[in-house]
Amino acid sequence: MNRNYFAAIKFALGLILVSFFLGDLAVAQTQVQGVITGRNGSTMTVKTQDSETIVVALTGDTQVQEVQGMMKMRKKELGVTALIPGLPVQVKGTTNDQHQLVADTVRFKGSDLKTAQDIQAGLAPTQQQVQANQADIQTNKTGIQANQQEIEANQQKIAANQAMIAAANKRFGELGEYNILGEVTVYFANGKVDVDPKYNAQLLELATKAQTITAYIVQVQGYASAVGSAALNQKLSRERADNVLAFLEQDGKIPLTNILAPGAMGTSEQVAPNATTEGQAENRRVVVRILQNKGIAGT
């Protein structure tokens, strides 16, 4: 074999490498930054700083990473369930035929995730507290002269709570509104986190129903009674939600792309007084809901 033959081989290999390189350029990744404004089925909407709304498709291959450290070099792998409305994210991926950005990676700061989770956990209880304070005022009207100072104090509490709600609503004002199309509550024994098998049928029925609904999302939120330390109750509520989520994924066949982060709500929403054993039992729970964006439902 002569030198010309080997030169031709090298030239051909060079052409192949160039074609691969050009092919990679043809499918160059797109990167966007913005805030998650909604989750619909296996997609989510992200509003960019330019007020553009991007539809992002989530897949089983999507990597979700919490960046850590001053230089954001350390990364913690999380599931797509962590992608909740109100979370600022950076998304990298490629555009598909439906003009959706198919996410290869979604990254966010841990502090931003905690803020989004805290606001979601605190919003509903704040609204309930406003209602409770208003009820107190109505009761106090029977002795308005003697209780005038207490009424004024309650009114101040109401004003403060309303300000908190307004601030939270400003943060979440652009989020999609959802219809609740199904709900199951799972209760737990004191200090326990395992799902009682008696709830399996209800959870399976809910999972089956969910998969008949267009662009459904399953929300999982765990709670604890206000007995014991705050740290312990937060841990219990998280583990209860995680165990219900595991059942829905493994037995109910609900893909993680259709599940909102299992919320560790702690003692944020007590539905019964903790002064009684019965009340405590009602507060040790996980609430599972099927949600559908009202825009998709047409309502």
Image: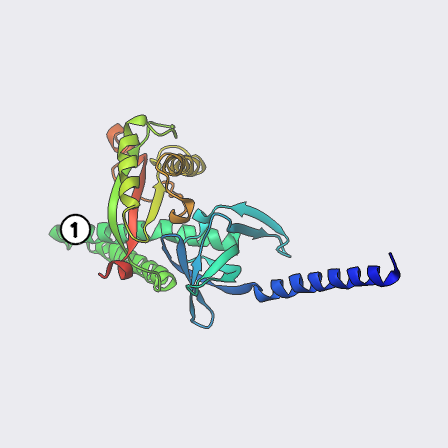
The crowd level at tag 1 (other Cα within 10 Å; few <14, some 14-19, many 20+) is some
- Image quarter in which the N terminus is found: bottom right
The residue tagged with tag 1: helix, strand or loop? helix
Q: Is residue 288 visible?
A: yes
Instruction: List the single residue furthest toward the right.
Output: 2
- Residue at 15%, 55% (x, y): give it: 145
Q: Is residue 144 left or right of residue 294?
A: left
Q: Is residue 17 left or right of residue 224?
A: right
Query: Where is residue 114 drawn, in percent x and y?
Result: 47, 51
Q: Nearer the viewer, residue 126 or 148?
A: 126
Q: Nearer the viewer, residue 278 or 176?
A: 176
Query: Where is residue 164 drawn, in percent x and y?
Result: 34, 59
Q: Which color mode does the image show?
A: rainbow
* Amino acid type, residue under disc 1 in the picture: Asn
Q: Is residue 106 visible?
A: no
Instruction: List the single residue furthest toward the left.
Output: 142
Q: Could you say which quadrant of the image residue 263 lies in?
A: top left
- Residue at 39%, 53% (x, y): give it: 119
Tell me: residue 222, above or below residue 12.
above
Instruction: List the single residue furthest toward the bottom.
Output: 50
Q: Nearer the viewer, residue 7 or 255?
A: 7
Tell me: residue 267, above or below residue 281.
below
Q: Which residue is mark 1?
A: 140
Query: Where is residue 151 drawn, in percent x and y?
Result: 21, 55
Q: What count of labels does the image hold?
A: 1
Q: Could you say which quadrant of the image residue 144 lies in?
A: bottom left
- Residue at 78%, 59% (x, y): give it: 9
Query: Where is residue 105 drawn, in percent x and y?
Result: 53, 55
Q: Nearer the viewer, residue 177 or 23?
A: 23
